Image: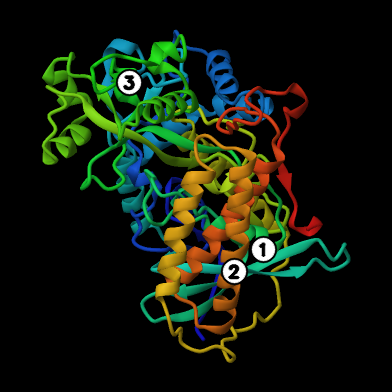
Amino acid sequence: MPHHHTQVAIVGSGLAGLSLSLRLAQAGVRCALLTKAKLASGSTAWAQGGIAAVLDPHDSTRSHVDDTLTAGAGLCHQEVVQLVVQNSARAIDWLTREGVAFDPDGATGTGYHLAREGGHTHRRVAHVADSTGQALVQTLNDKVLDAEHLSILEGFIAIDLITRPVPGRDPANQRCLGLYALNAATGTVETIAADAVVLACGGASKAYLYTSNPDTSTGDGVAMAWRAGCRVANMEFVQFHPTCLYHPHAGSFLVSESVRGEGGVLRLPNGSRFMQNHDPRAELAPRDIVARAIDYEMKRAGLDCVYLDISHQPKDFITSHFPTIYRRCLELGIDMAKEPVPCVPAAHYTCGGVITDTHGRTDITALYALGETTFTGLHGANRLASNSLLECVVFAERAADSITRLLDTQERSSDTLPDWDESQVTDPDELVVISHNWDELRRFMWDYVGIVRTSRRLQRAANRLHLLGEEIRDFYSNFRVNADLLELRNLVLVAELIVRCAAQRKESRGLHYTLDYPASDQASAQDTVLDPLAD
């Protein structure tokens, strides 16, 4: 079996992975960047809105911190929020120096056009029209492809981490030595030895039937870290974006938060507005409130969708601010300059994840995690719009500093890593089992662990997950792995963690809303932490 040797193995090529690999490569650190598909295939490329940052002289760190804390519903870690917001302008400056061409606007006094999104009290979202994520990955991809000391492994699907106990310490204290990954082109499992491993694999929204995420969002980083012995937290807080385009041929196309920030209003099929009945901030309320309001109105009236209307704005305004959304809607026969856009909520962002410190370090020595894979304490019970890309850039810089120091002080491992053992397995006989299980998982997660939950629904989901888990473990033990099996294995595990966390929270808070406990309970204003070593 092929072996790779590198100083740092980075799993995931979204903004977090790209930013970190670029910083480390520029510092002369040898890195291997693994991506499941092509470099630009992750969730970052799908991000439309932008990056929240304190750039306007009329804005303030205090205001951005307060908005984040308010959206987080009492569970944000204030010191982490403060750290990230204080570094927000620095993050925009770094991206600009790397070549990202944010939309300019001399009127703000900042040089940037700043959008406003739900939950923000100021215009503070730097963006590139309505395709900020695409601009980010294209710019950083070009840099990464030209970087020395950096090798790119496309089509490599991480399977599991390789760890060993740290000599002289408690046996529970592990050090990461590398990982196994499936090379999709050859069908072989390859061993990657590294002095440090970074999980920047994104979230797990593909556990749900309707999602704004690409097919790669299967919770791989959370699942791998959990199996290796890392704690996770707040997995119950799955953010549902309120406005995903509702059309049989639209796929997972998001209608950006900034459409509402620029005056878009939500309407029922009869044309009447409804958000003012749910929150005084109406369309500018945080995402959890807007998504729940839409879910309520759809169920109350038996609707397939609601409508987002910005047709009262001039056409030039719409096409200049939202060219990508306008183009896509027009391709589907919807002219958003003349008519409202049909929308439904969809699973969008995993607010919980692998517990890290403010340098991206996990419970395992030499194992780091970044981005949507993580729980840093920034997002609390509900992520404020456009804070996620900011988190990626800020923590990538801090992780790069920590990893560089680690490499300077840590002795290189002399362990010989074992080859992947598939001597006891055969080729799978019925791949249809995987596709059926995947479909079942996504449907019952949507029905039972979605925007509105109950204890009975969660128990039903737990029962189904137990059976699915047994079936997948048997399949994994007896047959050679393939991409679909690996992703399903990870999704089922992450779904179990979501359900376990949700069942433990006996209240409604932020993104977790249960009919059995509709009010918030101050005694429950704490993180939901799961520890695999305690199971």
Q: Locate residue 49, reporting x and y percent.
A: 35, 31
Q: Which residue is mark 1?
A: 227
Reply above or below: 408 against 457.
Answer: below
Measured in 3D between alpha carbons, the distance from the residue under mark 2 to the one under mark 1, in whole angstroms, is 8 Å
Reply above or below: 525 against 431.
Answer: above
Q: Please give left or right for residue 156 compared with residue 253 in the image.
A: right
Q: Which residue is pictured at 27% across the width and 26% down the height?
A: 307
Q: Which residue is mark 3?
A: 260
Q: Amino acid at mark 2?
A: Asp
Q: Secondary structure at mark 2?
A: strand
From the image, state whether disc 2 or disc 3 is nearer to you.
Answer: 3
Q: Which residue is mark 2?
A: 160
Q: Residues within 10 Å of mark 2 (few under 14, many from 20)?
A: some
Q: Residues within 10 Å of mark 3 (few under 14, many from 20)?
A: many
Q: Quadrant of residue 438?
A: bottom left
Q: Amino acid at mark 3?
A: Arg
Q: Please give left or right for residue 244 compared with residue 27 in the image.
A: left
Q: Which mark is residue 141?
A: none
Foreground residue among 350 and 321: 350
Foreground residue among 45 and 217: 217
Q: Amino acid at mark 1?
A: Arg
The number of discs equals: 3
From the image, state whether disc 2 or disc 1 is nearer to you.
Answer: 1
Q: Which residue is pictured at 58% across the width and 44% down the height?
A: 457
Measured in 3D between alpha carbons, the distance from the residue under mark 2 to the one under mark 3, in whole angstroms, is 41 Å
